Amino acid sequence: MTHTIHNLARGAIHVARAEAVYPSIADGSVALVISDGPYGMGKAAWDRQKGEDGLRAWYRPHVEAWGRVCAADATVYVWGTDDSASALRPLMREHGWTKRVRVTWDKQRSPILIQWRFVDAWPDVTEVCDVYMRGVPPFAMSGPSSCVWVEPFSDLDRERLRSTVMVRGRKASDPDHLGALHPCQKPLTFSDRIVRASSRPGDLCLEPFGGTLRMAVAIERMSDADARRYVLK
């Protein structure tokens, strides 16, 4: 895979495997990691790790890399399901990370695309995000007191304009130019909330599985006084 780097005002977006990016990050320089990798649900070829052992084996080199690049008071957010979170917790503990809290995204409904039509697959759907820390952070977390975040899919419409400039070859004149980049795209407000709660202005933040680049967008939109730096894969 060709390694391409896009340098923006406040950070770098690497088009490469995360394993190829970690060596370029200095030891102890990262204050925050937001991980949204495989859940082991078998929905796609890259998400078909077999059982808990398979998921842990896939994540192990990444968790080892986080241990090197993260500062002593860093925070790691790991998105997944109840099953994937349970599978990864022993691996995180093995590398010195302690689970502090769990955030639950109450999506309220989960539309699935079937024959180009969105239908409700389940009446109630959630995703979870386990928050890990090591050491004692020298600052108070400023995030919301609630551990249940509610941002229904219907509210994602306000983010879909980003797809006009973030999907190669898509033009504003295309009938689908407002489409979301991902059918289960997490709200941009979540990335903004996480970054502000678990890092300081000027800190380096890492998202090893960048996806729709939510963290980059959130940081690029911050005021100069609030801005962080970032590395995304």
Image (cartoon, grey):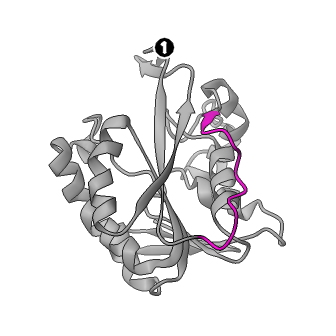
Pinpoint residue 203: horizontal percent, then vertical percent: 65, 76
Q: Amino acid at mark 1?
A: Asp
* Nearer to the camera, 151 or 212: 151
Number of dots carrying numbers: 1
Pinpoint residue 214: horizontal percent, then vertical percent: 60, 53
Write down the region rendered in magenta: 137-149
58 to the left or right of 71: left
Measuring 43% from the left and 84% from the top, which residue is drawn there? 24
Pinpoint residue 120: horizontal percent, then vertical percent: 48, 13
Question: Relative to 192, is 30 above or below?
Answer: below
Question: Relative to 113, is 99 above or below?
Answer: below
Whether residue 1 is visible: no
Prevailing secondary structure of the magenta residues: loop
28 to the left or right of 44: right
Estimate how packed mark 1 is, as few (under 14), some (14 to 19) or many (20 or more) residues with alpha carbons within 10 Å: few
Identify the secondary structure beneath mark 1: strand
- Residue 5 lies within the magenta run: no
Which residue is identified by label 1? Answer: 120
* Nearer to the camera, 145 or 194: 145
Measuring 33% from the left and 60% from the top, which residue is drawn there? 92
Measuring 69% from the left and 29% from the top, which residue is drawn there? 155
